[in-house]
Amino acid sequence: MTVSLTLACLWALVANLIAMLPSRDNYWRAAYGLIAAGIPVLGYVTYENGPWIGLLVLLAAMSLLRWPLVYLMRWLSGAGRKRL
C-alpha cells in the first residue's frame, strides 16, 4: 500500500473516531477540519495512484461527510432562484 493510501485510511479512521465523540455544534467544526485535511490527501492519492483510485477515495470521503455535501447541494440548487 502506498503512503497516500495509508494517509487516506488514517483520515477515514480519524473521521470515524471524531464521529464517536459528543459535539455541541453537530460536528460542523470537525467537518470543516476534515475537509481541509482531506483535500490535499485526495490530491496526493490521485497523483500517486491515478484518477480511478482517487475517485474511489473521493466517494468514500463523500459517504463519511454526507451532510456537508447535502447542504452544499441544497445551497447550489437554491442559489439560482430569487427569493421574494
Image (cartoon, grey):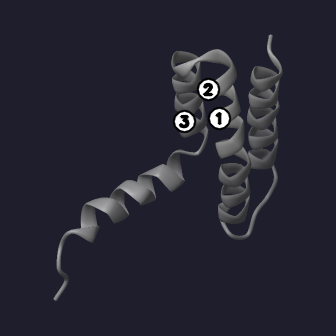
Which residue type carries mark 1?
A: Leu
Residue 12: quadrant of the picture: top right
> Disc 3 vs disc 1: which is toward the camera?
1
Quarter holding the C terminus is bottom left
Foreground of the two, 18 or 59 = 59
Disc number placed over residue 63 in the picture, else none: 3
Q: Are marks 3 and 2 in contact (CB under 8 Å)?
A: no
The residue pinned by badge 2 equals 46
Foreground of the two, 8 or 51 = 51
Among numbered discs 3 and 1, the one appearing first in the sequence? 1
Rendered view: 34 above or below 62: below
Residue 62: quadrant of the picture: top right
Residue furthest toward the bottom? 84
Residue 3: quadrant of the picture: top right
x and y percentages locating residue 73 in the rendered image: 36, 54
The residue pinned by badge 1 equals 42
Quarter holding the N terminus is top right
